Amino acid sequence: MNTDEDNTTMATTATWYTVAPGYRVNVRSGPSTQYPIVRTLPLGATVTISCQKYGEWISGPYGTTRIWDNIAPGEYISDAYVRTGSDGFVAPRCA
C-alpha cells in the first residue's frame, strides 16, 4: 500500500524582491507614513510581497508611487524602495 506521504507537503513558491541598496526601510502598520513604524529592515534585505494596495505617494530610488507592499501581516513598505521590475502591481491587491 502506497501512502504517498509526499502529497501531504505542499510546495510554496515565494518571489523574493530586493530592497534598494544602502537603505534601511521603515516598515509601517499601514500604507502611509502616518502609520506607526513596526520595525526597520536591515541593509541588503529581501522581502516577499503577499499583496499590494494604494496609499500615500512616496518617492524613492525606484521612482514615485502610491503602491505599498504588504510583506507580512500588518507590515507595509513603499514600493518605491523595492526592486520589483515593474511600475505596477506584481502581487494581488490587498483586501
Image (spheres, helix red, strand yellow):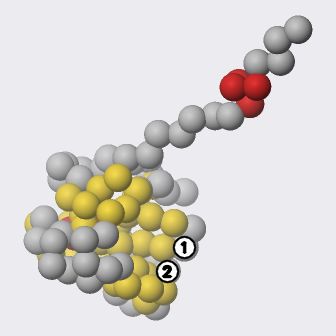
The quarter holding residue 43 reads bottom left
Q: Nearer the viewer, residue 59 or 61?
A: 61
Q: Is residue 48 above or below residue 78?
A: above
CB within 8 Å, label 1 to label 2: yes
Q: Which residue is mark 1?
A: 74
The residue lying at 57 percent from left, 68 percent from top is 73
Q: Which mark is residue 56?
A: none
Expressed as whole percent of the image width and height from the top left, the position of residue 7 reads: 71, 24
Q: Nearer the viewer, residue 9 or 2?
A: 2
Residue at 74% x, 30% y is: 8
Which residue shows up at 32% across the image and 80% down it?
Answer: 42
Q: Residue at x 46, y 91 (%)?
A: 36
Extreme-right residue of the structure: 1
Outermost residue to the front: 1
Q: Secondary structure at mark 2?
A: loop
Q: CA gap, disc 1 to disc 2?
A: 5 Å
**Quadrant holding the C terminus:** bottom right
Q: How many marks?
A: 2
Q: Amino acid at mark 2?
A: Ser
Between 5 and 83, which is closer to the camera in this rendering? 5
The N terminus - image quarter = top right
